[in-house]
Image (cartoon, grey):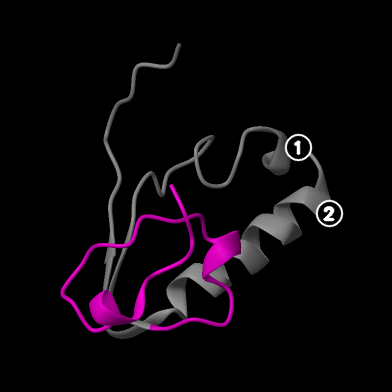
Amino acid sequence: MTDVVNDENANADVIKLMTIHSSKGLEFPYVFIAGVEENVFPLTNATMEAHLLEEERRLMYVGVTRAKDYLFLSYTNSRMTW
């Protein structure tokens, strides 16, 4: 995988899969954020410590504000964890 996009594909219709951290400063017409549920996003440890929960809130803000036109958030009612 690479972060480099060659010039001839720069305007192509593509799906970019990235972390929220790597999306800082970018905008997209459609944004999908998966796993918006307790102990997934925010992380389990974040709900126990105030400063970690605040970081998760900031991270969610970054993710949500990347969407120009449409934002999709997904979650499950039950999840099997490993």
Look at the picture and state if 82 lies above or below 69.
above
> Residue beneath label 2, please?
51
Q: Name the chief secondary structure element in magenta.
A: loop
> Is there CB contact under 8 Å for labels 1 and 2?
no
Which residue lies at the image location 48% right of the left edge and 68% below the top edge? 63
Q: Quadrant of residue 60?
A: bottom right
- Quarter assignment of residue 71: bottom left
Label 1 residue SS: loop
- 32 within the magenta span: no
x, y (%) of residue 13?
15, 74
Q: Residue at x 42, y 83 (%)?
A: 27
Drawn side of residue 39 relative to residue 9, left or right: right
Which residue lies at the image location 71% right of the left edge and 34% below the top edge?
45
SS at badge 2? helix
Q: Tell me the CA gap for discs 1 and 2.
A: 9 Å
* Res 48 label: 1
- The local crowd at label 1, few if under 14, some if 14 to 19, many if 20 or more residues have their Cα within 10 Å, is few
Boundaries of the magenta span: 1-27
